[in-house]
Image: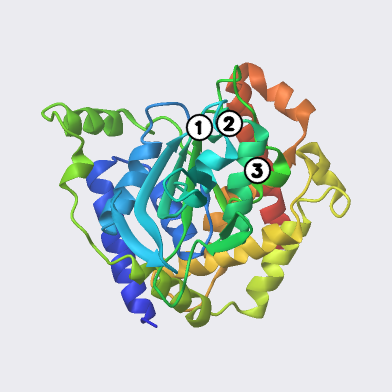
Amino acid sequence: MIELDEVREVGAALERGLSRVVVGYAEAKRVLLVSLLAGGHVLLEGVPGVAKTTLVKALARLLGLTEGVHANLSGVPHRGFARVQFTPDLMPSDILGSLVFNPATRDFEVRFGPVFTYFLLADEINRAVPRTQSALLEAMQERQVTIGGRTYPLESVSAGKFFFVAATQNPVEQEGTYPLPEAQLDRFLARIVVEYPATIEEERRIYELHMKRLTEPLEDLEKVAEPGWVVLAREAVAAGVEVPEEVVAYAAKLVRATRPSVFPPIAEYFELGASPRAGIALIRAAKAHAALRGSAVVEEVDVKAVLFPVLNHRVVPNLEKVVEEEPSQGRFGARYKVIREGLALAERVASQ
């Protein structure tokens, strides 16, 4: 196990590396690292062209993970990085793998899918049909795949092998898409809402970063840490970061305040509140956030920092309230605004 100081130092180096290829989006970068260190998966939601894919590819490159084979678990090769473009005709076997008949040996042999990797980038996950989405989400949850009656692990702590899925989706397009149900969205530790650049200064810096290059800036990135560091850092966060009783109580009050059955005024914002599993995810993410800022003790500030990305996909906003906000915010901006306001109310209730 490594020390928490090393987690903070390497985490800071990873953030600096991400900032060399993606301008702005400081919160998205931090939440991406939080999800990785908390052992969860992440969904990046935003319109095309806001660097969702670049963020994920840059993080993989900073950990020295490329598309080549980087590990063997029980004789099964695992690549460092794999990217799958989801389409309506994509089948579960295209993700997980399948048995293929070999005429030379007159027997079936396993063809392993792209899920056998450290980093899996699932691009536009909402374009795949539900059964393909479910196959990936099951592998994410179980961290293993069964092919031909045999089960293969996707990660191994002893071998320093982890499994991390970063999925992207465009919330605007509806034609030819299959939105993930709330129950399946819960498989992601966090949903990062990647919006347009915050200021004109950020927008200008983005243009300057690319205008004299023919290649992507991430191609210049050098490795900051070994892949095995992630497994060690996860263990350090789990064992070394303490959560005081008052912070646990604060998180519990916050999660319960999102439920109309417990706190009726929240019904103005939410039709359905967060579950206990959401509270577990909130604590895990807060521990990783505390480690990244160099603390061995979780504080309320850590819970607040990860509140929106961890809970925004685990509550169902009040549709009437969303419709009220649509004229000024747009369809999806209205959903985000209602969720933010509802979580802010729950946060005030928990602080009392």
Disc on res. 86: 1
The residue lying at 45 percent from left, 64 percent from top is 37
Q: Is residue 315 at all visible to an observer of this figure?
A: no
Callout 1 crowding tier (Cα within 10 Å): few <14, some 14–19, many ≥20: many
**Rounded to the nearest whole Å, what is the CA distance between mark 2 and mark 1?**
5 Å
Residue contact between numbered discs 2 and 1, judged by CB atoms under 8 Å: yes
Residue indicated by mark 3: 134
Residue contact between numbered discs 3 and 2, judged by CB atoms under 8 Å: no
- Marked residue nearer the N-terminal end (3 or 2): 2
Numbered circles on residues, count: 3
Of 115 and 48, which appears nearest the observer? 115
Q: Which amino acid does label 1 sit on?
A: Phe
Residue indicated by mark 2: 128
Q: Is mark 3 on a helix, strand or loop?
A: helix
Q: Which amino acid does label 2 sit on?
A: Ala
> Does 177 appear above or below 225?
above
Q: Is residue 91 at all visible to an observer of this figure?
A: yes
Of 276 and 199, which appears nearest the observer? 276
- Marked residue nearer the N-terminal end (1 or 3): 1
**Rounded to the nearest whole Å, what is the CA distance between mark 3 and mark 2?**
10 Å
Q: Is mark 2 on a helix, strand or loop?
A: loop
Residue 206 % position (x, y) = 25, 32
